[in-house]
Image (cartoon, rainbow, N blue to C red):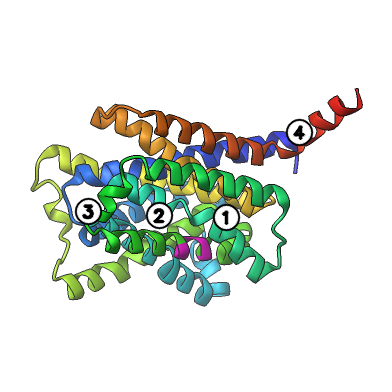
């Protein structure tokens, strides 16, 4: 893969991470509980993705992939990303934004493990070092005033749901990559949300007794309605296409997924911007640790080459 194309792929990933990192805050602004919000997100996001697919020439044929690989595509869409998103929004009913954002960030580590089991991809030294280093930064972030809060409010359920979301998301990323390469990120992401909606709507209605009515979108404060729309358009339609598309373009999925460690860092920055919370020294150090490890993983070859050249000089 050409270096310029690789950088564009990582730029797509970074934009996708920004979409992921802001989703917790946008979700809180909606004023809607987790399971119901998941239905709204899949409804609006699914419609947006279908529109994008029909506009984009190479993705207009949405039926052909389903005829050829319908069973695995539908199974991965529903049991993978749809279930993961339900757990994600459900977790926000129990845990804080920072807790969920941080715990979901375990996804890249699980991707490496799943990739090792499924595709026999070895866990290289740079992956191990950068992964452990970035995880240390994430732990540093979550223990800065949040660990005591976790233990005090007994948000174990939310933590479990967030970790389960990360695990399902990782499995989906690894198993669906061949289909993303074959059919493209736009179509595959469209299947996830468009098909997922038709499963989520009756499921949430039967289990929680919440039957989402599209006509009631604006039967709430305008700020809440706009937040729901933002979650569907920016955090879903745009964010997921950029994120999953970038993952499909890069040659090493495990390596690229370490970009996801930027998620809690961006969440902390948004906490300052939106919630007016100051960044503590521990949070600042965590940000440096996480961003440094991600940069080291992305530019590992360049760093090693520079060290070798200096050692020979």
Q: Is residue 216 magenta?
A: no
Q: Which residues are magenta?
A: 167-171
Q: Disc 1 marks which residue?
A: 184
For the residues bearing labels 3 and 4, Cβ distance under 8 angstroms: no
- Characterize the local packing of mark 1: few (<14), some (14-19) or many (20 or more) Cα atoms within 10 angstroms: some
So how many labels did they put on this image?
Answer: 4
For this view, does 250 lie left or right of residue 54?
Answer: right
* Distance (Cα) linking label 4 and label 1: 30 Å
- Characterize the local packing of mark 3: few (<14), some (14-19) or many (20 or more) Cα atoms within 10 angstroms: few
Tell me where residue 264 appears, x and y as whole percent: 42, 42
Residue 152's disc is 3
Tell me where residue 173 appears, x and y as whole percent: 54, 60
The earlier-in-sequence mark between 1 and 2 is 2
* Distance (Cα) linking label 1 and label 3: 45 Å
Q: Disc 4 marks which residue?
A: 302
Residue 50's disc is 2
For this view, does 237 lie left or right of residue 246?
Answer: left
Element class at badge 3: helix
- Characterize the local packing of mark 4: few (<14), some (14-19) or many (20 or more) Cα atoms within 10 angstroms: few
Seen as rendered, the residue at the extreme right is 312
């Amino acid at each position: 893969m050409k270096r310029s194309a690789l950088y564009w792929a990582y730029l797509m990933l970074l934009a996708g991470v920004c979409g992921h990192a802001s989703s917790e805050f946008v979700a809180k602004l909606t004023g809607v509980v987790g399971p119901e919000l998941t239905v709204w997100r899949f409804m609006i996001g699914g419609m947006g993705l279908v529109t994008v697919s029909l506009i984009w020439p190479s993705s207009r044929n949405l039926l052909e992939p389903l005829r050829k690989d319908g069973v695995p595509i539908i199974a991965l869409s529903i049991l993978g990303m749809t279930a993961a998103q339900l757990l994600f929004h459900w977790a926000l009913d129990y845990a804080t934004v920072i807790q969920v954002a941080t715990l979901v960030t375990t996804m890249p580590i699980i991707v490496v493990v799943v990739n090792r089991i499924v595709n026999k991809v070895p866990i290289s030294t740079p992956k191990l070092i950068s992964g452990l280093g970035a995880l240390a930064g994430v732990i540093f972030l979550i223990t800065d005033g949040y660990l005591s809060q976790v233990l005090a409010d007994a948000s174990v359920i939310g933590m479990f749901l967030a970790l389960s979301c990360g695990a399902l998301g990782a499995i989906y990323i690894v198993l669906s990559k061949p289909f993303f390469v074959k059919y493209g990120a736009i179509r595959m992401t469209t299947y996830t949300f468009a098909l997922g909606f038709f499963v989520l709507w009756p499921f949430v209605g039967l289990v929680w007794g919440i039957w989402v009515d599209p006509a009631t979108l604006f039967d709430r404060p305008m700020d809440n309605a706009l937040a729901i729309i933002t979650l569907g358009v920016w955090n879903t339609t745009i964010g997921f296409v950029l994120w999953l598309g970038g993952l499909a373009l890069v040659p090493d999925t495990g390596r690229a997924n370490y970009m996801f460690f930027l998620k809690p860092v961006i969440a902390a920055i948004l906490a300052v911007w939106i919630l007016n919370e100051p960044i503590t020294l521990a949070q600042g150090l965590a940000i440096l640790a996480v961003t440094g490890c991600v940069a080291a993983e992305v530019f590992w070859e360049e760093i090693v080459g520079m060290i070798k050249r200096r050692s020979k000089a």
